[in-house]
Image (cartoon, grey):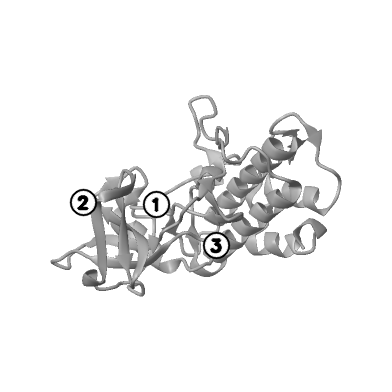
Amino acid sequence: ELLTLPKLSWISISGNPIAIRPVTNKKEIPKEMVSYNKSQILGLGASGTVYKGRFESKDVAVKIFKHDSKGSDGLAVDEVKIQQLVDHPLAVVANGVFLSDDGTSHEGMVMDLLNNTEAIGLTPSFDTVTRDAGPSDAFQDLSRDDVCKVIWNVGSVLDQLHSFAKVSHSDVYLHNILCDKGIAMVSDFGASFCYGDASHFEAIEVLAFGRLVEDLFAWFLGISVPNSISNVGCISGSPLEEGQLKDLLGSILQPDQGKRPTFSEIMETLSRIPDFD
């Protein structure tokens, strides 16, 4: 069965019948409260364009969806619904969403305007395929303390997503982890979906989290994290020292989904490890 493949680390079912589209309007705001300048483009994507705008007397980023957009990650309506479920200080999500003039579809959403933020990783290449291509130019040197802070922040967001919202981020990569003033935040919920009681999806994302940790240790610390799926480290380097962290990562990376810890269990274990005090 697809969902139980031992090396499956990333999967998105957004927009498919198996996914659950949440019923929520808690972040809907009147369209007239939002303004934006079409000449000030901050970014372009498959599902829409992000402009600099104004909301509640402050500068913001405003994403306007393409009409009837169906991006590579799914439908705009699914992204909007997920954005309204996520509420974590370390998640880059919408502060509000607004409808089109006729009220039949979501036209856009308002997000904080993040200045001077950089992604930690580079998107996968044809050489790396499913893994990030390496650290971005802005992040060539992170200390062990920095690496542990990134791990903690990402884990805390994923814990809330899975433990309380039953949402899979589905794109857990370092190219989606942004740093703002040294604080790592989880971004890009375009592939995210609700899964209800299907526990496979948390176990799959736990493995994606393990891959992210592998990359952090290999890129910045020259340490090879034991990968029990292949019984070797992901990249040659100094072996990770014996201890609670090595044991935890071994359980995260094991092929048997049923034996992987939940994100709640991961965070509880990390809280007892001195590196994460």
What's the residue at 36%, 62% (across, down)?
A: 60
Q: For the residues carrying marks 1 and 3, which lies nearer the camera in this image?
A: 3
* Residue marked by disc 1: 190
Q: Residues within 10 Å of mark 3 (few under 14, many from 20)?
A: some
Which of marks 1 and 2 precedes in the sequence?
2
Q: Residues within 10 Å of mark 2 (few under 14, many from 20)?
A: few
Q: Which element carries disc 2, helix, strand or loop?
A: loop
* Residue marked by disc 3: 90
Instruction: Tell me if residue 118 can be seen.
Output: yes
Measure how far apart labels 2 and 1 are at the Cα level. 15 Å
Q: Residue 68's mark?
A: 2
Q: Please name the amino acid that badge 3 sits on.
A: Leu
Look at the image and tell me in which quarter the C terminus lies.
Answer: bottom right
- Position of residue 75 in the picture relative to residue 188 (left or right): left
Which of marks 2 and 3 precedes in the sequence?
2
- Position of residue 257 in the picture relative to residue 84 (left or right): right
Residue pushed farthest left?
Answer: 102
Coordinates of residue 217 in the picture (x, y in percent)? 71, 41
Q: Please name the amino acid that badge 1 sits on.
A: Gly
Instruction: Tell me if residue 229 can be seen.
Output: no
Q: Please name the amino acid that badge 2 sits on.
A: Asp
Coordinates of residue 83 in the picture (x, y in percent)? 40, 63
Measure how far apart labels 3 and 2 are at the Cα level. 30 Å
Coordinates of residue 165 in the picture (x, y in percent)? 49, 67
